Image (cartoon, rainbow, N blue to C red):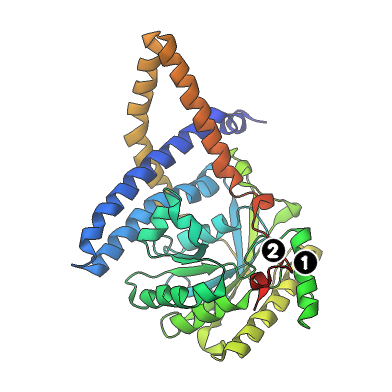
Amino acid sequence: MDLVGLLKSQFLCHLVFCYVFIASGLIINTIQLFTLVLWPINKQLFRKINCRLSYCISSQLVMLLEWWSGTECTLYTDPQAYAKYGKENAIVILNHKFEIDFLCGWSLAERFGVLGGSKVLAKKELACVPIIGWMWYFTEMVFCTRKWEQDRKTVATSLMHLRDYPEKYFFLIHCEGTRFTEKKHQISMQVAQAKGLPSLKHHLLPRTKGFVITVRSLRNVVSAVYDCTLNFRNNENPTLLGVLNGKKYHADMYVRRIPLEDVPEDEDKCAAWLHKLYQEKDAFQEEYCRTGTFPESPLVPPWRPWTLVNWLFWASLLLYPFFQFLVSMVSSGSSLTLASFVLVFFVASMGVRWMIGVTEIDKGSAYGNFDSKQKQND
């Protein structure tokens, strides 16, 4: 391991990133709270301000992926479709197999300048999580309980609010609902067999209801569906801890632009269309496993400097007073002070590990329990 690689793997560096992220995130969440006074006066101004505040948080994670770990992402796509990316609203369908696939989705949005306004369909519990969850709340993210009878109206209402959103956005959705594991895949294929649907080798059975209601609610506002199929070279299985340690990965993503008018309006036909799409995605993944490449022309969207500039701004603002505080604690010589410092250090290390643990595949949600039919009641 070279000197730079050794430096990137040190916990002190990780602690610095964690401190900047948490401190800046809480400051931004506080500012977002004060922007609520704008909502009844000028809703669109409120939205534009919160898009930029949201970018200040989410771009720090993209900075880790791109500038710290140096992870590259090659897009395989139609050059004519490529020219439209970032210039229109789009529903982005992502496969859900890797611990950092959500981060690759954010990186895609960043490369085309729509990260601040981009949306996800997220679990309702995440709205209570400080920093990311609170940021999502202020940017009108769409939350669901995964109980269709409760979500039918609330999700539709949230999506309808996005029809007059002033910023361009990608609406990122994992139709599989949870990350791929062999155990979940076995259960999912049992569900597919019971429903008379073709088996999938590299994906779980998509949950269609969320997609159907998204298309219905955003039709004539969203121009296209971007079908994104992600994989990593050399059979790598990237992790957030690897990114934090500065490990470089190389992602390949096949992106197909499908005009929204090609997606059926009828609920049953739209669901059947999504199942067919996943059969095609499965074939693309199988081809990639066999040849190491996707169809279409390979393109590498350039990195934008703003994620790095944003992090450097917050680091310069927050690190100097933090180190001053640490020096004053250590130089005081008080055993109580030093014990407090050790305790804070330990809590911070646990905080870093918890944040990483949230992304781990084996911490994903349960899937397909036959005793709980609502989880696959499509």
Q: Which residue is mark 2?
A: 367
Image x and y of residue 94, in percent: 60, 67
Count every numbered label the image shows and give the total: 2
Q: Is residue 225 visible?
A: yes
Secondary structure category for the residue under label 2: loop
Residue 269 is left or right of residue 313, and the answer is: right
Q: Nearer the viewer, residue 10 or 28?
A: 28
> Is residue 338 placed above or below 132 in the rendered structure?
above
Residue 132 is left or right of residue 365, and the answer is: left
Which of the 4 image quadrants contains residue 294?
Answer: bottom right
First in residue order: circle 2 vs circle 1: 1
Q: What is the residue that sits farthest to the top in this orientation?
A: 333
Image x and y of residue 80, in percent: 53, 78
Q: What is the residue that sits farthest to the front in this orientation?
A: 371
> Is residue 186 placed above or below 321 in the rendered structure?
below
Q: Are marks 2 and 1 in contact (CB under 8 Å)?
A: yes
